[in-house]
Amino acid sequence: MKFGGTSVGDVAAFERVCGIVANQLDRKPVVVTSAMTKVTDALLAAFEMARRDRLEDAVASLEPHFERHVEITEAFFPSDAENVFHNELRLARQEIKDLLTRAARRSLPLQMLKDAIVSYGEQLSSRLLAEALKSKGIRARTVDSRRLIVTDDEFGAAQPIIDETNELVKIELTPLIEDGEVPVLGGFIAANRGGETTTLGRGGSDYSAAIVAAALGAAELQIWTDVTGVMTCDPRVCSDAATVPVLSYEEAAELAYFGAKVLHPKTIKPAVDSAIPVRVCNTSEPELTGTMVLADSGEVPNKIKSIAHKSNISILRITSARMLGAYGFMSAVFQVFDRHRTVIDVISTSEVSVALTLDKPDNIDKVVEDLSRIGEVEVEGGYAVICVVGEGLRASTGLAAKIFNTISDVHVELVSHGASAVNLTFVVRESDAAAVIGKLHKAFFSEKVNAKSESCDLTK
Ligand code: ADP
Ligand code: ASP
Ligand code: MG
């Protein structure tokens, strides 16, 4: 059972989580929690302040967040004698201050310090949640994820070493579970082989939960969040989005990758590999089933399931007539992206040119410099990727035509279809994206929703 940041955001949320876990004790749950909402952002901001020699501001900026933890302790352990968390918090404050001081002095590699600092969000929330569960009579026990999840040294986006992790998860957690205890782990955080703290990337708690579920061969992975499952569209964008009851792994993976934040893109993999069903449900509406993600959701002709989008996209085009009829062009292009560790989202090719999209073009200048040796390069920002997902795309003819007819007044820059049979992905100008999503949502989900979906808001 993985609880996201808003699910452990305040006293009422902690109460709800305790109720949800208590209801499923007979299923022998393992709990994985995110940091309390906004805490990860605050720790990252404090790190940046410290690095820019604003140490005092950095330390002070965290105080309101420590206070939010104190509020939980006061609600769950009204008497000071029971309050074992006070000491933890005092120590954490001191340790974070030391780490921020080191960041200001640059006395350790900064990426390493950043992960050490940001890990306190989940270290604190997991200890606090275990104590809250105990206060309700549940035999909970914090287990430090950094002893279980072993990763490489890629601070900030570490990759788990799966064999070693599986072994440790089983050794550490199985005896507790068999003994009727509920292990409570912080998501997102891990350690490399040298024992230094690493993190799995933003939103990575889902991934931690999937890794643990796979290692234990869990019957189900439950992702508890602030929406009722995966919806027909981000509900912050279209207010009348509806829950999708069943998704296939393939559909969920495409949606997650193309911007549906509700599932971390990597979550799907360990669950797919171990054939574990994933359920996405709402902490505020625990009685609703939410979305089940299953190996196979069944094809429904002419139906799409959901629309995802990613903003802030740049299109890069590379053209080289020299390559006409010659092999090795693609290989040369991809080697450049490989060398600069740059991720490509959507790609479309012709004989002499390639167009592709990039979502974090940090080192774009270097990529362009290297690509310029192969051909003429053009980069343009201000685009959005729209991804329409559904097994129905595999099962029906004419669905793509219906999609493009619906938005026939919009200029489509790039289209990709066929690599995965369940998605149709295209790129439009960022300024057109809200209207495109609104029209598609209305055209494909109008039986469930009312016509007001035509106006969507991408600013939320
Ligand atoms: P948590 O903190 O629980 O991990 P996230 O903020 O990572 O939660 O993910 C939940 C959010 O994902 C929702 O509040 C919603 O705005 C967003 N989201 C984006 N696309 C979708 C979608 N298709 N269905 C449901 N939620 C979505
Ligand atoms: N707390 C981390 C983040 O905000 C991980 C997570 O919530 O999944 O990115
Ligand atoms: Mg999340």
Image (spheres, rainbow, N blue to C red):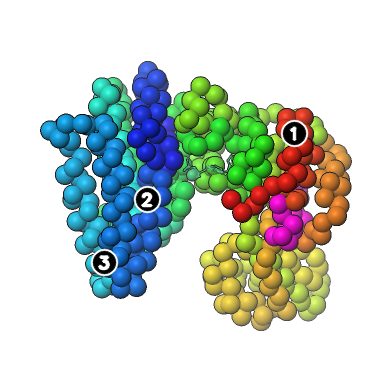
**Residue labelled with disc 2:** 39
Give the magenta-colored segment's residue range. 415-434
Residue 85, by quadrant, is top left
Other residues around mark 2 within 10 Å, as few (<14) / some (14–19) / many (≥20): many
Image position of 451 (left or right of 172): right
Secondary element under disc 1, as helix, strand or loop, is loop
Question: Closest to the observer: 199 or 53?
Answer: 53
- Residue denoted by label 1: 450
Q: What amino acid is labelled 3 in the image?
A: Glu
| Quarter containing the N terminus | top left
| Tag 3–tag 2 contact (CB < 8 Å) | no
The residue type indicated by label 2 comes to: Val
Q: Is residue 106 magenta?
A: no
Mark 3 = which residue? Answer: 56
Q: Amino acid at mark 1?
A: Asn
Q: Which residue is pictured at 81% across the width and 68% down the height?
A: 351
